[in-house]
Image (spheres, rainbow, N blue to C red):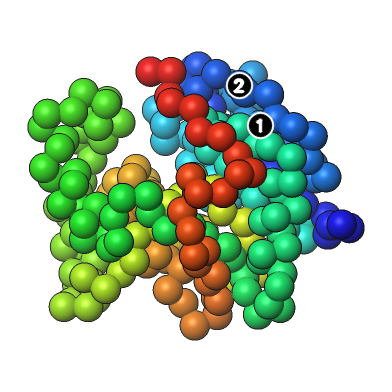
């Protein structure tokens, strides 16, 4: 399979995820860490990882397609071919995403964080002090009673073609991450809800495909 020019990006800082060996992919790869993307003192490592996630197309321009892979996933043979094939089957599709592994809607993700943040050390480490209720009010102001219809996507792996609409949506994603809350799955579907973007949502969840393997975070 001949691919368009594709860049795969990933990021892990301060050993949050140990680098995993990937099977060779027919694409260029950029795996960000504190050595090749020095930590900014004003940002936490978790926050800094959102920069290449939202701005892979801006940090290294010139590609037709971009793929994001969270650092705790191991890519196997055929991964990038599968993603680009699925994205390009329909010329109208701009971005490929997967359903959330546990929640059907964004509101369910909100409820999960409200219920579990007080008792989960992992969630506290990542999200304590984030502006969850302020973000809820922002989404409520935009969508009103329709906010319950916002689907929840799994932001661990996604692929997109370079387009003005997608780039603008990813900029907006960074706004919500930095302004309100670093759980980017709360706002992914909202920023992609644009007239100039066609979203392909895969039928199955990330875990149901054989092209990658999940590894738990190291800490």
In the depicted structure, whether residue 84 falls above or below residue 196? above
Q: Nearer the viewer, residue 107 or 80?
A: 80
Q: Which residue is mark 1?
A: 31
How many numbered marks are there?
A: 2
Q: Above or below — where is 169 with respect to 14?
A: below
Residue 100 sits above or below residue 167 on the image: above
Give the number of the disc on residue 19: 2
Q: Secondary structure at mark 1?
A: strand
Q: From the viewer's side, name the closer residue of 17 and 103.
A: 103
Q: Position of residue 191 (x, y in %)?
A: 42, 66
Where is residue 134 drawn, in percent x and y? Answer: 17, 54
**Where residue 95 is drawn, which disc sits there?**
none
Do labels 2 and 1 touch, CB within 8 Å?
yes
Identity of the residue furthest to the bottom in this view: 195
Residue 158, horizontal then vertical, whole percent: 56, 53
Residue 198 locus on image (x, y percent): 55, 76
Q: Is residue 114 left or right of residue 21?
A: left
What is the crowding at mark 1: few (fewer than 14 residues within 10 Å), some, or many (at least 20)?
some
Q: Residue at x 30, y 69 (%)?
A: 150
The residue located at (16%, 78%) in the rendering is: 145
Q: Residue at x 46, y 50 (%)?
A: 155
Residue 166 in view (yes/no): no
Left or right: residue 190 versus residue 89 is left
Screen quadrant of the N terminus: bottom right
The residue under the point 50% across, 49% down is 208
Instruction: Give the number of the mark in front: 2 or 1.
Output: 2
- Gap in angstroms between the C-alphas marked 2 and 1: 9 Å
> Which is more N-terminal, label 1 or label 2?
2
Element class at badge 2: loop
Quadrant housing residue 10: top right
Q: Label 2: how many residues lie within 10 Å, few (<14), some (14-19) or many (20+)?
A: some
Quarter of the picture holding the C terminus = top left
């Amino acid at each position: 399979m001949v691919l368009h020019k594709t860049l795969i990006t990933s990021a892990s800082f301060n050993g949050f995820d140990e680098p995993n060996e990937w099977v060779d992919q027919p694409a260029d790869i950029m795996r960000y860490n504190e050595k090749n993307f020095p930590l900014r003192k004003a940002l936490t490592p978790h926050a800094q990882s959102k920069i290449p996630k939202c701005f892979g197309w801006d940090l290294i321009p010139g590609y037709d397609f971009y793929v994001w892979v969270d650092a705790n996933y191991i890519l196997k043979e055929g991964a990038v071919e599968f993603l680009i094939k699925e994205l390009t089957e329909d010329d109208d599709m701009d971005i490929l995403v997967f359903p959330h592994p546990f929640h059907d809607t964004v509101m369910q993700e909100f409820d999960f964080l409200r219920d579990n943040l007080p008792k989960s050390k992992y969630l506290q480490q990542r999200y304590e002090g984030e502006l969850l209720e302020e973000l809820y009010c922002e989404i409520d102001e935009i969508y009103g009673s329709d906010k319950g219809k916002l689907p929840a996507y799994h932001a661990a792996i996604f692929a997109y073609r370079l387009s003005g609409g997608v780039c603008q949506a990813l900029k907006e994603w960074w706004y919500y991450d930095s302004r309100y809350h670093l759980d980017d799955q709360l706002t992914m579907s909202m920023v992609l809800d644009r007239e100039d973007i066609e979203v392909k949502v895969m039928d199955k969840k990330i875990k149901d495909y054989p092209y990658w393997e999940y590894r738990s975070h190291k800490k």
